[in-house]
Image (cartoon, rainbow, N blue to C red):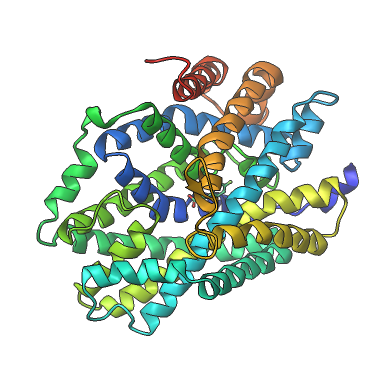
Amino acid sequence: MSEILNTRDSFGSKFGVIAATAGSAIGLGNIWRFPYVVGENGGGAFLIIYLAFVLAIGLPVMLSEFIIGRSSQRNAFGAFKVLAPGKPWYLVGVMGVVAAFMILSFYTAVAGWTLEYIYQSFANGFAGKSSAELSSMFTDFRSESWRPLLWFFVFMAMTALVIIAGVKNGIEKYTKILMPVLLVILVVLCIRSVTLEGATGGLEFLFKPDFSKITARTVLEALGQAFFSLSIGMGTLITYSSYVSKKETLGSISFSVAVADTMIAILAGVAIFPAVFAFGIEPGSGEGLVYITLPNIFQQMAGGYVFSLLFFLLLGVAALTSTISVLEVIVAYFVEELKLSRKKATWLATGSVSVVGIMCTLSWGAMKNVELFGMNVFSLLDFISANILLPLGGLLIVVFVGWFLGRNKAKAELSNEGRLKVVYFPAFMMIVKFIAPIAIALVFLQQIGLIRL
Ligand code: PFF
């Protein structure tokens, strides 16, 4: 055991920790998934529920993962084995590894679309196209087979290469430079989008709640999106925080990451919806929403060529800092539990994820007729992982911290063995013991129709 502890890699600085955690949280979930889910769920009212979930459930789950990871110094599976020996809690870790497999397979497909859009930006492929043409450009591309597959594999390989390089040389180095640049570009896009003619409809859609649009399904989607966007519920942050030094303040790291993540999602919404309304695009057009809308904006702005290229490049980087965090969950598990070398573990994980990833990538092409519960493979994995496995994982994680690990251990970890003041601690305990588990359970029960609120 001590051998593992001694040879474990760790983050080099506080900024590195925040950057890597924020790098995991900020990604396609904010810029691709958030706007399309908001669009499908009626706008403003969904946004309010989403924000409430981030604050009241997301943050406490995040802190709970940090407590588990840093106190055990293990991967998502091993952490439970160390903290609860002989008990079945490690199954939460197993569920996390399964969720990681699912997420990585469909997420990398979307990340591949980003590479196609980098290429199209470079080749000036959006120029002179009407809104309808840009829309079919996306749907035609997605229903091909070879191109989406090629980009999928390129992205998967990039992820694997960073992971092989290790935590400090890989993850940290790549994440801390580029996210601020993405933020600046996003702000520029927002400005262009809200100054388009007909933009106000989009702002109203996003910020004016219409609660008649809320259904049981909407609430579940909001919860799932909060978990997905914050990278919580499957042990990513257990794994990352196992590399965090005992001196860092877990409370402030979580808070900064949650704020940054939410800010980027809202900015993405402000960049997308005004343009959606201005160009007459359907807000509920699904997974293609961002890829269809943004090229329209780039065409209508000074320097659009450069902005488009830069934007998709940085979106690719944001996606990469997330895919590496998901792959790391699987690799850390393989390395520490199956005792594989880092390299072997990485290729084994990458290879097996790719099998499912191919099916996701072809979900609008060669495999479009394969459906279950009315969803193709891609949407099914997206739905099961984000809306079911992550909230369920989160539920078990808070119950573990609130009821099993106990008050003293949780407090010791959050306060760095009593050196820090943790004024929020009573509220935190109240949430992890009662509020979060009950709220998540109610959302599930409501979804399966057992209760009606
Ligand atoms: N949070 C990432 C995003 O918003 O793009 C996606 C993600 C990463 C989800 C890691 C889950 C995870 F464990």
Q: Nearer the viewer, residue 103 or 317?
A: 103
Inspect this view and state whether residue 292 appears.
yes
Q: Position of residue 437 (x, y in %)?
A: 54, 20
Q: Nearer the viewer, residue 351 or 398?
A: 351
Q: Position of residue 63 (x, y in %)?
A: 57, 33
- Residue lying at the far front in this picture: please name it: 369
Q: Is residue 125 found left or right of 439 in the rendered image? A: left
Residue drawn at the location 66% of the way across and 55% of the way down: 327
Which quarter of the figure has residue 171?
bottom right
Q: Position of residue 244 (x, y in %)?
A: 66, 45
Which quarter of the figure has residue 337?
top right
Q: Is residue 282 found left or right of 409 in the rendered image? A: left
Q: Quick one: quadrant of the N terminus?
A: top right
Q: Position of residue 422 (x, y in %)?
A: 54, 25
Circle count: 0
In the rendered view, would you say 416 is above or below 342? above
Residue drawn at the location 67% of the way across and 23% of the way down: 400
Which quarter of the figure has residue 196?
bottom left
Q: Is residue 453 found left or right of 226 in the rendered image? A: left
Residue drawn at the location 30% of the way across and 46% of the way down: 39
Q: Nearer the viewer, residue 276 or 419?
A: 276
Residue drawn at the location 55% of the way across and 21% of the way down: 432
Inspect this view and state whether residue 311 appears.
no
